[in-house]
Amino acid sequence: MGGIAVSGREALFPNYAPFFSARLVKGKGSKVWDENGREYLDLMSGIAVTGLGHAPDAVKQALIDQLENLWHVSNLFEIPGQEKLASMLAEAGCADLAFFCNSGAEANEAAIKLARRYNRKVLGNNRYEIIAFQSSFHGRTLATLTATGQDKVKDGFDPLPAGFVHVEYNNLEALEAAINDRTCAIIMEFVQGEGGVNPAGPAFAAGVKRLCEKHGLLLIADEIQTGIGRTGQMFGYQHYGVEPDIITLAKGLGSGFPIGAMLGKAFLRDGFSAGSHGSTFGGTPIACSAAIATLETMKREELPKRAARLGTEGMLRLRAALADHPELVSVRGLGLLIGIELASPVTDIVMAAQKEGLLVITAGPNVIRLLPALTIGEDEWFGGLDALAGIILKSKNGVAV
Ligand SMILES: *Cc1c(COP(=O)(O)O)cnc(C)c1O
């Protein structure tokens, strides 16, 4: 017996409510085109994924070369691409070891498992609790949605795994009060992405690290949105002068080819042993080739530096353009992860921008979020910001005209 014959969107579970009406069929650089040939300027990069723009030549060529040779063999074999990618990631930050998977949620899931298992098996204690922050986002698996500090992702999914607590972000006292003899780790985004583009304060970030050292806790940096150059450094934590013990990556790592990674410091090595964790697709030769070419391009073209400059100049330009708008709350962010908060919901403005050929997204109800490719042309970037500012200036109570 088959299912009932359905077609179009009816054949899909309704968990996505597509926001945009454009049906996109082609992309190059920071431009995408819909099925009617209409062109759009992409300032969202598939939610921080296509950091090198669409179909970047170096990654495309690496994928084509790999497709000619070997697609998949399983982790029962040594995969040379994993070793090369791991050492490139180690060189880019403070971590020494890598585990590869396919998504952000899986990377955070691995981090949670490593934090618990390291405490159990290496330190020989029974600490398992992880402190996360309100408004955070860490993924959609049962453990990572439990870690996420937003009720809407948990609705209807209980019972949830035990061992997660939440405290207010940028509130060091609340954090210290939540630490107890079960706590094993703190997971944080150095800039909360989905939660509204909220950067950690410098004193808060330093304080989190100090508390981790004082209480013997692991610091897990969720760099899934902030990583791979987006904030103006390879990793967001690098703005703060603190080192996490574990780093999680996905989104921008493969330029649109799915790959996630959990990185850890060398002392965590024995937290995992043969057979303790794994993934069929994690770190396939194809995925590794995309990520290696992505990192090589980042380095060759000094894209984090470019993201820092374009982000700083872009935020100044937005603040100047929107200074007289009565509903502007703030323009904030780090590098090319930028939020424009207004006093009212911004959905209508985001829809109006699409109509004008400009793709941006929200981050919570009142924040317009910009995540352009790090390779975006200067004219595209500043022209896009001026056009967006024009749409915002014409809006009243969140309604675009
Ligand atoms: C997107 C995101 C995730 C989840 O990544 P998926 O690939 O969707 O599982 C986790 N953490 C942060 C900070 C993210 O932005």
Image (cartoon, helix red, strand yellow):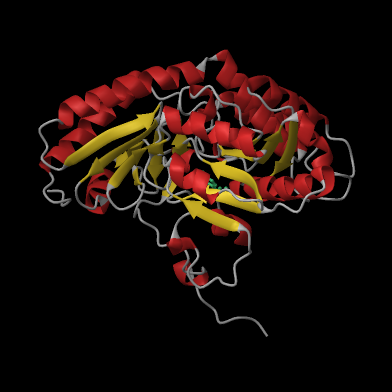
Point out the image quarter for the N terminus. Answer: bottom right
For the point 88% across and 35% down, the residue is: 78
- 359 or 329: nearer the viewer: 329
Q: Quadrant of residue 326?
A: top left
Name the residue at the bottom extreme: 1
Q: Quadrant of residue 314?
A: top left
- 160 or 301: nearer the viewer: 160
For the point 67% across and 49% down, the residue is: 112
Residue 254 visible? The answer is no
For the point 38% across and 17% down, the residue is: 309
Position of residue 75 measured from the top left corner of the image (x, y, whole percent): 84, 44
Q: Give above or below for 301 relative to 323.
A: above
- 24 or 171: nearer the viewer: 171
Q: Give above or below for 85 relative to 148.
A: above
Position of residue 28 measured from the top left corner of the image (x, y, whole percent): 46, 32
Position of residue 56 measured from the top left corner of the image (x, y, whole percent): 54, 28
Q: Give above or below for 136 relative to 318.
A: below
Left or right of 60: which side holds 38? left
Left or right of 3: which side holds 361? left
Position of residue 313 measured from the top left corner of the image (x, y, whole percent): 30, 19
